[in-house]
Image (cartoon, rainbow, N blue to C red):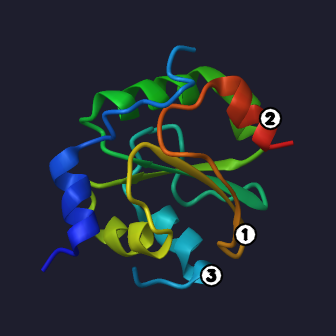
Amino acid sequence: MLHLPLLALVLGACSTDPGPQAAQAATTPTTAVAAASASTSAAPEASPAATAHDRTLLFFLNPSGRPCQMQDQIIRQLGTELTSRVDLRYVSIDDPSSRALMGSYGIRALPTLILVDSSGSELHRFPAGIRDGAAILAALE
């Protein structure tokens, strides 16, 4: 049985409100990053098993949703400027194993970016919607 908030995510695809910057569960925090590492990666170059940094940027997305695709494009454009600072993990609603992770962080809208430390504790949560590259990098300082 799907939980109502997750069902809303699946039926609603991605948030239809891309946010003002568009122009430009069941696991503990300690296991959340491990679960994210096991999730399906939408970016082949982001190795799910690698953990080079003490912080991880979790990217919760629906790969079919246009706002999520736009956010992915922004993240990819940041390239090594982003990945030299944090590990990047894609957490897709298409992956059934991601449901617990989405629930543990209370994901209600997509795309959502959350910066976590190595134990899975939340350091920064971006408002749901599309975030520009400068805002993402500024939060990583």
Q: Are marks 1 and 2 in contact (CB under 8 Å)?
A: no
Query: What residue is shown at x 37% (from left), y 54% (from top)?
Result: 40
Of residue 18 and residue 32, the one placed in the foreground of this image is 18
Report the residue marked by disc 3.
Answer: 30
Q: In the figure, is residue 54 to the left or right of 114? A: right
Q: What is the number of the mark on residue 138?
A: 2
In the depicted structure, whether residue 86 falls above or below residue 72:
below
Query: Between 47 and 88, which is closer to the camera in this rendering?
Result: 88
- Please give the label number shown on residue 136: none
Circle 1 SS class = loop
**Can see residue 94?**
no
Q: Amino acid at mark 3?
A: Thr
Which residue position holds label 1?
Answer: 118
Q: Residues within 10 Å of mark 1 (few under 14, many from 20)?
A: some
Query: Quick one: label 2 or label 3, which is nearer the N terminus?
Result: 3
Q: Nearer the viewer, residue 7 or 62?
A: 7
- Cα separation, mark 3 vs mark 1, equals 8 Å
Question: How many neighbours does mark 2 have within 10 angstroms: few (below 14), some (14-19), or many (20 or more)?
Answer: few
Q: In this view of the protein, can residue 57 be seen by the observer?
A: yes
Mark 3 or 1 closer to N-term? 3
Judged from the image, the secondary structure of the residue bearing numbered disc 3 is helix
In the image, residue 38 above or below residue 24 = below
- The kind of residue tagged 2 is Ala
Identify the image quadrant of the C terminus.
Answer: top right
